[in-house]
Amino acid sequence: MRWLYIYLTALSVFYFAHLPLHIAISKIGIPNEVGFISLVAITLMLYFLRLLEGKEHDVSVKLRCVLYSLPFSMYAGISYFVSGDYLNDIQNVLVLCFVNPVFIFFGVISSNHKNRVYFATIILASMYFIFITYLKLTGQLVTPKGQAFLNIFDSGNEYQNIGIFMGLFIVLMTAKLIKTPFILQLPLLLIILASFYYMLLVGCRSAIVSLVFVLLFWWLYGGRIYRYYITASICFLGVVLSWLLDLSWIKLVAHSNFLAVSRFMVLANDNDASSREFLFSKAIELFTLNIENILLGAGINYYPIYIGEHKVGYYPHNIILELLAEFGTIGTLFFMIPIGYLLIKRYVALGAIVGKNDVEKTAFFIFFYLFIINMFTGGLRASWMIVFFLFLLYPQDSDVGKKNQYTYSIKNLPKIWRH
């Protein structure tokens, strides 16, 4: 029970993104917002109980990450009240001013328990793997070329959602691979292979591109053992796919059952069906429209208005371009302050931003995976997931050094602010 707040934190992070959890709670009859707020409140209460019992360490230093995030939250709030409510929608400002600071806090307090966060994430991501495997084996997962597949939740075309969790599953399974007994490595490798196969089937381009970048970066900076396993896995993947499909690599590229390949081929033929080129260029255009926009931004929620769409759901699909377009250079710099502090802290404590041990490297590569996705499809409206995993990068107390560790209880709480 003492680590319950860590697992509740993971549930909070994935509450709206994890479709099985999302739909199960809806079936119970609990309004989504009520369930989310209740889960966050219970998690905070459990953490503060541990704090009062003196079971948490290095609290004041961790709280600086939260304090450094407040200038951007205040800037976002001021932007909202000065610019006006362009879309009659308050979610963006609520997320940026209130939700994200809470998940920054969740990230730093979970940083000493990264393996527990990984475990909870594996459990949640494995639900997708199990359900998709079941549908594939029973013939219910249909992916004809050019059409949306029948997803496991019957709630529309949710390929990006499934792709993100399958990618997370692969990243975490790859991290587990080298620690797994040799006799279990082949089954684990087959699970990784099947997960990537499902990503190809459902057509999630952003998640696939992000995963490729992560595996490349991991190959370069993960160390010799990871380099060996990733190379072996890629070779094994190629051999098995070629054998299963009885195709050469040239034919594999054109294989109609892979919706992801078909969608990549659309891009190769200069057909911007997803409008990314248009969305990116309009964000840059809005940012550079005048000196006021360059410095201060056009205002929260103004981007849809600028492209002629007066409704929620239209955004640059690139979190950096969204920051620049709507919050300008000043707002983007405010957003970067806690990130800069965190990366400096990580470099000083670990000697490298990537990290030197497997636990810290895994944290970095999970964040890197989500960051690349947010460069192609993410937005500020639901940014608490990437914010959480960014601040999960805070180095563990054992890495910071004994001289910087303090234990706080109700008796010495005032000392926190003098440290």
Image: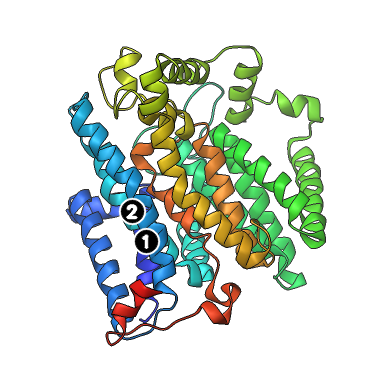
Q: Residues within 10 Å of mark 1 (few under 14, many from 20)?
A: many
Amino acid carrying label 1: it is: Phe
Which circle marks residue 27 in the picture? none
Does residue 192 appear to the left or right of 145 in the view shown? right
Tell me, yes or no, if residue 128 can be seen here.
no
Q: Residue at x 49, y 21 (%)?
A: 280
Quarter that holds the N terminus = bottom left
Q: Residue at x 66, y 46 (%)?
A: 214
* Res. 285 image quadrant: top left
Which circle marks residue 105 in the picture? 1
Q: Residues within 10 Å of mark 2 (few under 14, many from 20)?
A: many
Q: Is residue 182 above or below residue 218?
A: below
Q: Residue at x 78, y 42 (%)?
A: 238
- 109 or 35, which lies in front? 109
Q: Position of residue 72 (x, y in %)?
A: 35, 43
Pointer 2 residue: 101
Q: Are marks 1 and 2 in contact (CB under 8 Å)?
A: yes
Q: Residue at x 23, y 50 (%)?
A: 26
- 300 or 140, which lies in front? 300
Secondary structure of the residue carrying numbered label 2: helix
Q: Position of residue 326 (x, y in %)?
A: 36, 27
Does residue 94 appear to the left or right of 137 in the view shown? left
In this view, the residue farthest toward the front is 418
Secondary structure of the residue carrying numbered label 1: helix
Tell me, yes or no, if residue 209 can be seen here.
yes
Amino acid carrying label 2: it is: Pro
